[in-house]
Image: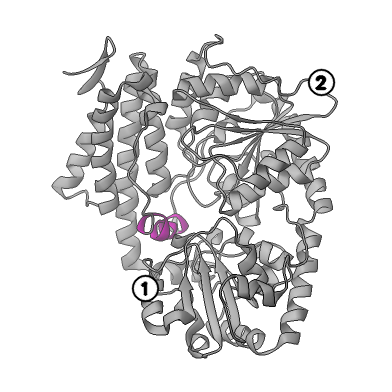
């Protein structure tokens, strides 16, 4: 980036940046405090407690931007804890995964597989496209629901099994270590704060080639130190993995998202009736998690569309956010039923079939949803007017979609208006993007890319003893900007532990830890200032999880 553009970015955002830098400093200190507490328990041999606190540290680092995309002290702690895991049969799951060797065996590892969202679809299609492999799936989080039907069917068709780990974090790590031993390749598509794979694999020098899917490329995640290859799904994610996560260039690779092109499952007319849409209206559809639509510096999708929504024959439906989220509250008050935010749905096919135009989420794009819409033959329009200063990973840069990204709001409105008015324009745009998506993301292109990734993973696995992972880079302007939507729009529930996660059902001990973590979490979400007593109390609360204040003696918690 030129010095002139960089200076413009800094000048235009000076005051917000100062505020967000403070947010990052505050979050970093909290994460460091939690890691120190986990280290203290680990030194004293209480790894059941250390693992719980380490997981919380990873969750806080994900939810509250610290400016780090990988933390060496946390990875080092997990490696040390991994070395302590015994090779006993406790936690072992005898599944016979990988036996026979008639086909290469691939073990896909997920924290949870939910019916909604692109994450599960990515794993499902990976298994479907990789027909040469016997693919099984491991779910590391026992509290998560059963995988949806399409994923289960893909695993069954591949000759594999779905396995759910249970017990404490250590139990699950031991079981996963045993399972990994029988696989030819491991593919990690885990949640950002899932430490179970790291505990299972970090000290397992014999583990098979391991691919970590960089599906959350714009945030912190654990597991960088166990990756033989980090497979990013777009150029900006790959660049960030190399520049900031410390992934060596020969282990940081890009591969397309597997996408199938197919006709609509129902006619537009039948689909519109199925979703309750009557009359000859033009349906604009957008899909994405609620935070991807949350206003940033006053900019959001409703504002960008402007007068298009005033037309009485135009409807906008958003799947993901609800009417209680902004900017949808104000939109409903202004436009009534013409704008609807209906929350996340497990089956969005009827809405895709009924839609006339697909709008990528904004300010943050939803790549998989946009690709799915384009593969169906829907015209897709994406807006990235902040390209001069917005972080690269918050801009739509998928190779199949770049020609449909507009940087000017006026041109964006003009293009959407053209598509709303002309059926022939919609049809031509839909055919064009459908062909391009098949060229970039179709099965043949994806399999060629997979071969390159697996070859690189095998090469890297053969040289593990000579390679040392280290995080790279320091927080910069883009990290500060990312804090705007990572921190401000995360409204998920408090950090809590369940009986399945630790202490072997000792609920009194878990209640004590949960009480303290809830206090930490509330202060994090309230964004207490370092100058405030509340923030200092948060640091003290985090540190009180160490043996200096709270320790395990003969199976019971006691105050020192």
Range covered by the magenta-colored residues: 478-488
Would you name the residue on which mark 2 appears?
A: 100
User: Alpha-carbon neighbours of circle 2 within 10 Å: few (<14), some, or many (≥20)?
Assistant: few
Would you name the residue on which mark 1 appears?
A: 329
- The answer to whether 237 appears left or right of 196 in the picture is right
- The answer to whether 413 appears left or right of 516 in the picture is right
Count all numbered tags in the image, as a single digit. Answer: 2
> Camera-side residue: 38 or 313?
313
Q: Residue at x 52, y 90 (%)?
A: 311
Quarter the N terminus occupies? bottom right
Q: Residue at x 35, y 16 (%)?
A: 46
Going from N to C along the chain, the mark reached first, 2 or 1, is 2
Based on the displayed image, in which of its 4 quarters is residue 247 positioned?
top right
SS at mark 2?
loop
Q: Residue at x 25, y 20 (%)?
A: 547
In x, y percent, where is residue 19?
30, 60
- The answer to whether 132 appears left or right of 365 in the picture is right
Most common SS among magenta residues: helix
- Relative height, residue 552 to residue 147 (above, below): above
Based on the displayed image, in which of its 4 quarters is residue 33 positioned?
top left
What label does residue 257 carry, if any?
Answer: none
> Camera-side residue: 260 or 338?
338
Does residue 327 appear anywhere in the picture?
A: no
Does residue 317 appear anywhere in the picture?
A: yes
């Amino acid at each position: 980036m030129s010095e002139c553009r960089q200076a413009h970015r800094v000048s235009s955002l000076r005051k917000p940046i100062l505020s967000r830098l403070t947010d990052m400093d505050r979050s970093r200190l909290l994460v460091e405090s939690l890691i120190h507490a986990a280290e203290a328990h680990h030194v004293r041999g209480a790894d059941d407690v250390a693992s719980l606190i380490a997981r919380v540290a990873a969750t806080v680092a994900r939810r509250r931007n610290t400016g780090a995309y990988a933390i060496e002290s946390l990875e080092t702690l997990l490696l040390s804890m991994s070395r302590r895991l015994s090779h006993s049969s406790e936690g072992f799951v005898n599944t016979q995964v990988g036996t026979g060797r008639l086909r290469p065996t691939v073990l896909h590892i997920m924290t949870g597989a939910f019916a909604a969202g692109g994450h599960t679809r990515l794993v499902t299609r990976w298994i479907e496209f990789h027909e040469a492999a016997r693919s099984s799936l491991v779910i590391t989080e026992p509290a998560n629901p059963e995988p949806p039907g399409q994923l289960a069917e893909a695993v069954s068709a591949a000759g594999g099994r779905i396995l759910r780990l249970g017990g404490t974090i250590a139990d699950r790590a031991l079981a996963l270590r045993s399972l990994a031993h029988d696989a030819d390749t491991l593919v990690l598509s885990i949640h950002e704060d899932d430490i179970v794979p790291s505990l299972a694999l970090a000290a397992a020098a014999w583990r098979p080639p391991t691919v970590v899917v960089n599906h959350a490329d714009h945030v912190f995640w654990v597991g960088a130190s166990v990756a033989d290859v980090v497979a990013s799904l777009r150029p900006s994610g790959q660049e960030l993995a190399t520049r900031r996560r410390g992934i060596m260039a020969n282990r940081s690779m890009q591969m397309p998202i597997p996408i199938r092109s197919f006709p609509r499952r129902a006619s537009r007319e039948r689909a519109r009736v199925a979703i309750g849409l009557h009359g000859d209206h033009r349906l604009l559809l957008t899909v994405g998690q609620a935070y991807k639509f949350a206003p940033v510096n006053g900019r959001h999708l409703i504002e960008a569309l402007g007068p298009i929504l005033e037309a009485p024959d135009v409807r906008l439906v958003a799947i993901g956010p609800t009417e209680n989220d902004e900017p949808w509250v104000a939109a409903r008050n202004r436009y009534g039923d013409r704008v609807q935010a209906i929350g996340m749905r497990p089956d969005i096919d009827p809405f895709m079939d009924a839609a006339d135009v697909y709008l990528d989420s904004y300010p943050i794009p939803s790549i998989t949803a946009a690709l799915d819409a384009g593969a169906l033959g829907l015209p897709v329009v994406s807006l990235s007017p902040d390209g001069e200063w917005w972080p690269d990973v918050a801009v739509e840069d998928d190779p199949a979609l770049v020609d449909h990204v507009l940087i000017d709001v006026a041109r964006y409105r003009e293009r959407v208006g053209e598509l709303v008015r002309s059926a022939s324009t919609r049809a031509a745009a839909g055919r064009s993007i459908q062909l391009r998506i098949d060229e970039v993301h179709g099965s043949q292109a994806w399999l060629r890319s997979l071969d390159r990734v697996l070859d690189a993973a095998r090469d890297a696995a053969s040289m593990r003893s000579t390679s040392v992972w280290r995080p790279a880079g320091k927080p910069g302007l883009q990290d500060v900007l990312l804090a705007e939507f990572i921190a401000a729009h995360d409204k998920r529930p408090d950090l809590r532990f369940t009986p399945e996660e630790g202490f072997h059902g000792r609920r009194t001990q878990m209640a004590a830890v949960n009480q303290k973590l809830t206090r930490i979490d509330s202060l994090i979400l309230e964004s207490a200032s370092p100058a405030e007593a509340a923030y200092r109390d948060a640091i003290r609360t985090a540190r009180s999880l160490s043996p200096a204040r709270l320790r395990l003696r003969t199976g019971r918690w006691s105050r020192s």
